[in-house]
Structure formats: C-alpha cells, structure tokens
C-alpha cells in the first residue's frame, strides 16, 4: 500500500450521519472537500484537567458544487433554527456499484450552519452560466464523533450542551 502524505489526503462530506447507515452511502451524495479547517482549544491545568469556559469551535470547509441542487441542503440548514449532522470521510474508496467500500478515518460533526458563501468560477458554459461554484460553509460545532476503523474506536467530544 502506498504511503499517503497529508497534502494528498482526499476528504468528502455527506450531509447526514454516516454512522446510521454506513453501507448505503452513494458516491453521488458525497461532495469533495477542497478546504477543511477547525480549531478545538481546551484550557487545562498542570494535572491535565479541563477548566474554565471553552471557546466556540467553528468548522469551515469548501466544496465545489456542479449545480445549486447540491448546495440546497446547506442553505436549507442555514435557514433552519437547529443543528444538523455532517460526515467527513478521509480517503474513501467506492465499490463498482458506487457505494462506499472503505475509508481511512472520519468524523461526524453535529452543529449549526452559520454561514454559506458562494464563489463562482470564471469559466462559462455555452449558455453563459458558470459551470461550478465553490461553496464555503461555516458551522458552529455542537459535537464531534471521531471515527476509527472499528466502532469501538469512536470518540465523542461535546462542545455545546
């Protein structure tokens, strides 16, 4: 197996909880993540115990969408007053039936969509419309479940009760 370096990792996002139905993830429902960033900082004392209030955890990611139908879920979740779940899978592979076969690791993020920004490409199709849109999504994280290869390796971190 080839050695993968961090700048070669491929990530996809699915606008649902992957854990609930891991065998039924279709490739067409996965959006390739172009950019991914979040910072989780906890204050700890010398004993390693957590103390004080925690800074809000914001996750930002960018995906390239081919149509606004793919972006609709993020706008719908932005308009709703509630939290939603998104699954991020790293180095996924798909079987010949275009269903998820395997992944290296991942995380399921539960949170509130607080921002969606569109950036259009300069290329135009024959009708004069932009062919692709880069969608930048910002989520206020409520909790994260870090996925291992086995269910026993999953770790959950809760940020907002």
Image: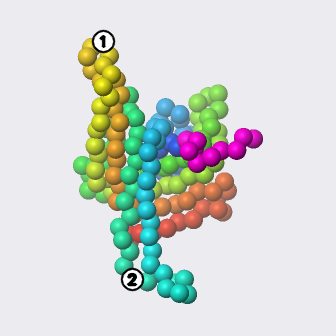
Q: Which mark is residue 126?
A: 1
Alpha-carbon span between mark 1 and mark 2: 57 Å
Q: Which residues are magenta?
A: 1-10
Q: Position of residue 156 (x, y in %)?
A: 53, 66
State which quadrant residue 40 falls in.
bottom left
Q: Is residue 127 visible?
A: yes
Residue 114 lies within the magenta run: no
Q: Position of residue 51 (x, y in %)?
A: 43, 83
Circle 1 SS class: loop
Q: Quick check: marks 1 and 2 in contact, CB under 8 Å?
A: no
For this rendering, which residue is in front, 142 or 125? 125
- The x and y percentages for residue 139 are 35, 55
Position above or below: 75 against 138:
above
Quarter placement of the C terminus? bottom left
Q: Is residue 60 left or right of residue 23?
A: left
Q: Residue at x 30, y 19 (%)?
A: 124
Residue at image location 38% in from the left, 64% down from the top: 57
């Amino acid at each position: 197996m080839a050695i993968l370096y961090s700048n070669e990792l491929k990530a996809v996002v699915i606008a649902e909880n992957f854990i609930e139905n891991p065998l039924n993830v279709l490739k067409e429902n996965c959006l390739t993540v172009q950019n991914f960033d979040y910072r989780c900082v906890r204050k700890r004392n010398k004993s390693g115990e957590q103390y004080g209030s925690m800074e809000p955890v914001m996750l930002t990611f960018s995906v390239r969408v081919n149509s606004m139908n793919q972006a609709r879920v993020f706008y719908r979740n932005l308009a709703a007053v509630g939290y939603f779940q998104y699954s991020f899978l790293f180095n996924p592979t798909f079987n010949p039936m275009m269903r998820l076969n395997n992944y290296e690791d991942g995380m399921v993020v539960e949170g509130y969509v607080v921002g969606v920004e569109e950036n259009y490409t300069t290329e135009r199709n024959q009708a004069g419309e932009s062919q692709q849109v880069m969608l930048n999504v910002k989520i206020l994280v409520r909790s994260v479940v870090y996925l291992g290869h086995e269910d026993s390796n999953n770790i959950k971190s809760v940020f907002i009760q």
